[in-house]
Amino acid sequence: SSGAPVMSFMEGRIHSFGYNPSDGDYGHVIVTEHSIKGRKVWALYGHLSASSMHRKYVGQQVKSGEVIGYLGGMKENGGWPPHLHFQLSFIPPSTHDMPGVV
């Protein structure tokens, strides 16, 4: 439900964050960067609340299991019912967005 906490899946850092305002898009997102056995991987957390963006900065360290945001309501997350869009990629994103399939 809206306001439910979203945790980092592993230790890393914030790569980028922002807002995708179009209907059907991710709404507020955070992208984190991680290293798994020396290989970089990026994680996108989408459909977050606007308040999730407060006090975030690029390079900010995150711990495994740390609350990094909260699920957003329909009016702030692209018109979707509250849920988390979680996506991993080996392709470095150039912004706070990733293609739907990577």
Image (cartoon, grey):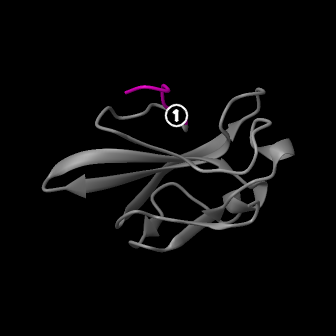
Return the x and y of residue 44 as percentages of the image width and height: 49, 45
- Local secondary structure at mark 1: loop
Task: Residue 13 in the image: state x and y as whole percent.
Answer: 41, 60
Q: Position of residue 27 (x, y in %)?
A: 71, 40
Is 85 situated above or below 7?
Answer: above
Q: Quadrant of residue 10?
A: bottom left
In the rendered view, would you say 22 is above or below 71? Answer: above
Residue 50, given in percent of the width and then of the height, sits at: 77, 54
**Structural crowding at the residue carrying mark 1, measured as other residues with C-alpha within 10 Å and reported as few (<14), some (14–19) or many (≥20):** few
The amino acid sitting under disc 1 is: Thr
- Quadrant containing the C terminus in the rendered view: top left
- Is 66 above or below relative to 36? below
Stretch of the chain drawn in magenta: 97-102
Q: State the quadrant of the N terminus.
A: bottom right
Q: Nearer the viewer, residue 67 or 4?
A: 4
Horizontal arrangement in the rendering, residue 19 relative to residue 12 (left or right): right
| Of 76 and 53, the residue lying toward us | 76
* 47 left or right of 22 in image: left
Q: Is residue 101 magenta?
A: yes
Q: Give the quadrant of residue 71.
A: bottom right
Given residues 50 and 57, the one toward you in this image is 50
Which one is nearer the viewer's eye here, 80 or 55? 80
Residue that extends furthest to the right in the rendered view of this protein: 75
Residue drawn at point x = 72 percent, y = 51 percent: 82
Q: Which residue is mark 1?
A: 95
> Magenta stretch: dominant SS?
loop
- Badge count: 1
* Residue 45 lies in the magenta stretch: no
